[in-house]
Image (spheres, grey):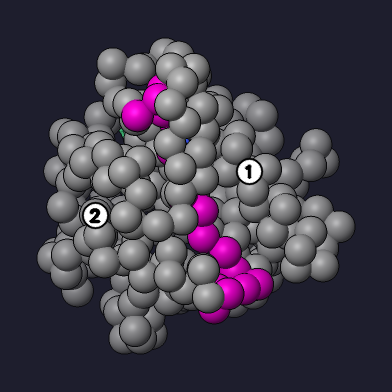
């Protein structure tokens, strides 16, 4: 529940009825375009499934950064038990709080949470973090210098409103200092399935042309490594490169 002090705190939210969630949801609606947003019902279900222990050994986290009742940002993420990875779902920080390391702190807390999930699932540690970022995102370039991989795959985020899929970069950031140069193709296939099936709640991923296209790219490869980032940065609000569902064009 919300702390009443004005110190910046990060609180885990576990109910759609929590006022912190309601305020974070307003920020979410402002920060992401309709084709990338999922309705309140989605979060309500996840909280309920989590409460009933139905997600285990997967897990879902929703963390809110706030000063008293004022929400500055939030992050959502999932523990993908199938590959022992954390996955960043949504992250947004109120523009007035930019530059205060709120995003960084939220991400750090999410990593701590999924590390606990990894231990609870019987692993000695978390394998790493994954997430989707825009082509040309400067943060990903920084992450690559710190050992993250921009996976060599034309990745498509499914549309959340049924209109268009979104071409993004799928990254992998190892949890340990050890440099990782690639992921096994079979692990990546399972991760892609888990992203579509568990995160986006797509009933039949194999029926989605964009999902099949990703599998075809992996077919015949034993490992998938990183690739250079070449596209120029584009702010999220200006992103226009959506592709109508079923008509796959990748420049
Ligand atoms: C991206 C955003 C959250 C950055 O917030 P901020 O508080 O101004 O940024 P910070 O100064 O804390 O630094 C950025 C931190 O956010 C995180 N971050 C930034 N972009 C990210 C991305 N695309 N995916 C995951 N984490 C990201 C990182 O943890 C980074 O810190 P690090 O370099 O120490 O790892 C903010 O600009 C925003 O809300 N943008 C609109 C929504 C959006 O594009 N979200 C990202 C993809 S879901």
Q: Name the one closer to the observer, 103 or 197.
A: 103
* Image vertical order of residue 207 relative to residue 42, above or below: below
Q: Is residue 168 left or right of residue 88?
A: left
Q: Secondary structure at mark 2?
A: loop
Q: Is residue 172 left or right of residue 72?
A: right
The residue singled out by tag 2 in the image is: 37
- Residue depicted at 35% across the width and 41% down the height: 20
The span picked out in magenta is: 53-69
The residue singled out by tag 1 in the image is: 111
Residue 100: x and y in percent read: 45, 14
Residue closest to the far right: 124
Q: Name the one closer to the observer, 39 or 18.
A: 18
- Residue depicted at 51% across the width and 53% down the height: 61
- Circles 1 and 2: CB atoms closer than 8 Å: no
Residue 75: x and y in percent read: 44, 42
Gap between marks 1 and 2, in whole Å?
22 Å
């Amino acid at each position: 529940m919300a702390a009443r002090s004005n110190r910046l705190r990060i609180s885990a939210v576990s109910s759609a009825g929590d006022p912190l969630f309601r305020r974070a949801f307003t920020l979410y609606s402002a920060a992401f375009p309709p084709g990338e947003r999922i309705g309140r019902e989605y979060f309500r279900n996840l909280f309920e499934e989590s409460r009933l222990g139905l997600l285990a050994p997967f897990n879902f986290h929703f963390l809110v950064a706030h000063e008293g009742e004022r929400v500055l940002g939030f992050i959502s993420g999932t523990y993908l038990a199938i590959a022992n990875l954390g996955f960043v779902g949504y992250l947004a920080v109120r523009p007035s709080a930019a530059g205060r390391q709120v995003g960084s702190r939220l991400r750090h807390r999410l990593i701590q949470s999924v590390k606990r999930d990894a231990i609870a699932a019987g692993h000695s540690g978390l394998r790493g973090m994954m997430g989707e970022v825009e082509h040309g995102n400067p943060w990903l370039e920084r992450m690559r210098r710190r050992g993250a991989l921009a996976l060599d795959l034309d990745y498509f985020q499914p549309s959340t409103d049924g209109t268009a899929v979104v071409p993004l970069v799928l990254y992998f950031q190892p949890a340990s200092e050890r440099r990782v140069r690639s992921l096994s193709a079979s692990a990546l296939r399972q991760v892609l399935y888990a992203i579509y099936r568990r995160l986006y709640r797509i009933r039949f991923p194999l029926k989605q042309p964009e999902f099949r296209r990703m599998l075809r790219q992996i077919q015949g490869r034993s490992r998938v490594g990183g690739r250079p980032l070449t596209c120029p940065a584009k702010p999220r609000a200006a992103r226009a490169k959506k592709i109508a569902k079923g008509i796959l064009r990748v420049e």
